[in-house]
Amino acid sequence: MKTAKLANSYRVDDGKHFRLKDFDPADTGHWHSVEEAKDQVQKDITRMEELQAMLYAQDRWSLLLIFQAMDAAGKDGTIKHVMSGVNPEGCEVHSFKAPSETELQHDFLWRTTQDLPERGHIGIFNRSYYEEVLVVRVHSAVLDSQLIPKSLITKDIWKERFEDIHGFERHMARNGTVIRKFFLHLSKKEQKRRFLARLDEPEKHWKFSEADIHERNYWDDYQEAYDEMICHTASKHAPWYVVPADNKWFTHLVVAAAIVETLEELDLCYPKVDAAKLKEIQAARKLLGKK
Ligand code: ATP
Ligand code: MG
């Protein structure tokens, strides 16, 4: 069956043998077109709405969804589309740009920690602490601008950061935050096509950034950094999904399926009320009936 655990083919929960080049950004699995996928995405969005209502009412688990990608891979569009059914009251999106002066006064997990979802909520990180092993790794000047004591910056720094992230995510998982991480895997060719489209379409001009074109020069370094990041931080308690991103409709399909599959695995249910509460409900019904 096409939909059974659709997202599993893209899930990495042990990075030992992981190689990014084994994943094709243009892959669409057994699916052929946006028309074909539309119904399934809609079904998943509806089911997500039901599951989120229980997550919220139960107030035990929280769900953290992390999105990382090269520019123009479709993070924003995916978040907007896939989360369109959820109740905004129980869902927060946070975007992380270059750190502020205050944020640089703290360790690299500090700023994102403050935005972690509370129980019953879904938190979405559009970029995250993973930038600390991506842009910070690709551009050594960024690491230099952090205020870390020089003696602590050694050749082991990336290995140490991977370990710390792994430990942090394990801690979160052990306390009821379910973490799912999405790398939207875009090809260099498709990125170029999307950048050109931004130049050609006036409504997309606001999205154009010269810096994005500059970052493209570091494409291979970024791919290497993503590869290592996934190798070292994919785990059972916080798996990565390497989501093909050359076709937006397929990205939406996989991400929606992954979220539904994750929520279905939790023991979500509405809280049961006790006998005293049931009595109160009966009394209230009587009272309302009289008026
Ligand atoms: P858009 O899709 O709208 O372009 P974006 O997420 O790319 O959204 P930008 O403002 O274009 O947002 O870029 C944010 C920038 O902030 C990225 O270049 C990212 O690498 C950078 N950034 C994020 N976290 C860090 C960090 N910890 N240290 C340095 N730079 C960071
Ligand atoms: Mg950008």
Image (cartoon, rainbow, N blue to C red):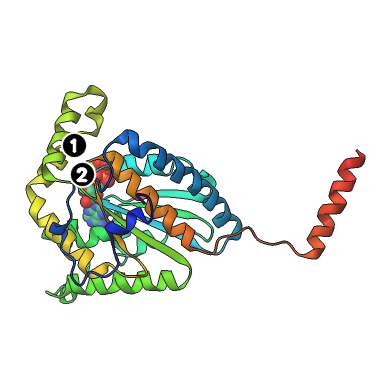
**Which residue is found at the position 36% from the left and 64% from the top?**
110
Marks 2 and 1, how far apart at CA:
10 Å
Above or below 106: residue 247: above
What is the number of the mark on residue 71? 2
Is the CB–ligand 2 distance for label 2 below 8 Å? yes
- In the image, residue 67 lies at what x, y percent? 31, 52
Which three-letter amino acid code belongs to the residue tagged 2?
Asp
Name of the residue lying farthest toward the front? 1
> Are the two marked residues, 2 and 1, in contact with CB atoms closer than 8 angstroms?
yes
Relative placement, left or right, of 201 versus 105 is left
Rendered location of residue 232, percent (x, y): 22, 70
Q: Residues within 10 Å of mark 2 (few under 14, many from 20)?
A: some
Identify the residue at horizontal 30%, vertical 39% (top origin): 249
Task: Name the residue that disc number 1 marks.
Answer: 209
Residue 222 picture location, percent across and down: 14, 55
Left or right, residue 56 beside residue 45? right
Q: Nearer the viewer, residue 270 or 229?
A: 270
Binning the other alpha carbons within 10 Å of mark 1 as few (below 14), some (14 to 19) or many (20 upward) gives: few
